[in-house]
Image (cartoon, rainbow, N blue to C red):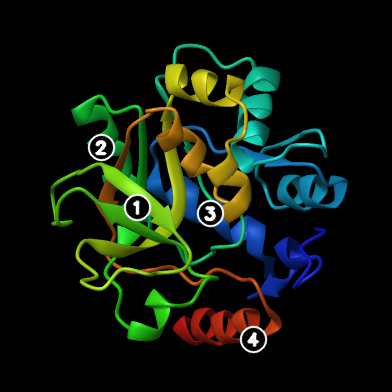
């Protein structure tokens, strides 16, 4: 709720449903496991419950979303699961097929951490520090799952080979999640405000799958109005 650029954004409405509850619906459509919202805000908890979802209240002092996910995992006392998949609460048009694909690749490859990335369609994205890019070891293709070499905001490279638009979805093997939250934040993580660099700095592998497209994250009023127009036009 305390997003600086767009305060209260999780509860903004599209088609009379809050953004965060739209994300819940997309997650449920993927049908790969139980869906739970982890939030520090009572208002979000109540909205999710009112719309038929499940939510858990977490502390408000977490440095990263992954730390919040781990607290929720502990509070829920979930047993007999291998992976937790973390979706962002401000991407209501995330493609369920991309979520399913990431989950399948994680299981088939027995990976520790996995995420998604999309082809960069506009050159301006390469130099937009608000857009996180991932550099992969090999070219991303439909069915491969290469490892991430680096995550960047500002691009100083010249050949732009194997650079993709990172999508903020993470799948964690439970053992990797436990390992990650015990690690101290690294210099690169804090400098770039990218928690995934903590994993790379500590030799935890992150595999990357190719998504169909980049979902629109809601960071500004303009983002919200653009997405609202797209999603309401679909109906």
91 horizontally vs 207: left or right: right
| Pointer 2 or 3: first along the chain | 3
Q: Circle 1 is placed at which residue position?
A: 116
- 159 over 104 or under it: above or below: below
Q: Quadrant of residue 23 in the image? A: bottom right
Q: For the residues labelled 3 and 1, say whether their Cβ atoms are less than 8 Å apart.
A: no
Circle nearer the viewer, 1 or 2: 1
Pick whichever, 72 or 198, lies toward us: 198
Q: For the residues labelled 2 and 4, say whether their Cβ atoms are less than 8 Å apart.
A: no
Pick whichever, 117 or 29, lies toward us: 117
Q: Residue 86: horizontal and vertical position, in percent?
A: 51, 41
Q: Circle 2 is placed at which residue position?
A: 104
Q: Circle 3 is placed at which residue position?
A: 25
| Pointer 3 or 4: first along the chain | 3
Circle nearer the viewer, 3 or 4: 4
34 horizontally vs 218: left or right: left
C-alpha gap between disc 4 and disc 1: 24 Å
């Amino acid at each position: 709720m305390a997003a600086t650029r767009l305060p209260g954004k999780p509860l903004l409405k599209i088609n009379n449903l809050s953004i965060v509850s739209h994300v819940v619906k997309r997650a449920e459509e993927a049908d790969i496991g139980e869906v739970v919202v982890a939030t520090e805000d009572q208002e979000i908890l109540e909205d999710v419950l009112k719309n038929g979802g499940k939510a858990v209240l977490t502390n408000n002092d977490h440095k990263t979303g992954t730390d919040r996910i781990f607290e929720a995992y502990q509070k829920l006392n979930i047993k007999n699961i291998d992976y937790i998949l973390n979706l962002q609460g401000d991407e209501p048009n995330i493609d369920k097929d991309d979520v399913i694909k990431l989950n399948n690749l994680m299981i088939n490859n027995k990976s520790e951490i996995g995420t998604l990335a999309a082809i960069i369609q506009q050159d301006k994205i390469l130099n937009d520090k608000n857009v996180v890019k991932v550099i992969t070891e090999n070219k991303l293709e439909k069915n491969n799952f290469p490892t991430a070499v680096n995550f960047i905001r500002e691009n100083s490279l010249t050949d732009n080979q194997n650079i993709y638009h990172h999508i903020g979805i993470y799948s964690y093997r439970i053992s990797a999640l436990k390992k990650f939250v015990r690690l101290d934040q690294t210099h690169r993580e804090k400098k770039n405000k990218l928690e995934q660099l903590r994993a790379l700095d500590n030799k935890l592998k992150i595999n990357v799958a190719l998504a169909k497209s980049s979902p629109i994250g809601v960071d500004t009023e303009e983002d919200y109005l653009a997405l609202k127009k797209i999603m309401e036009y679909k109906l």
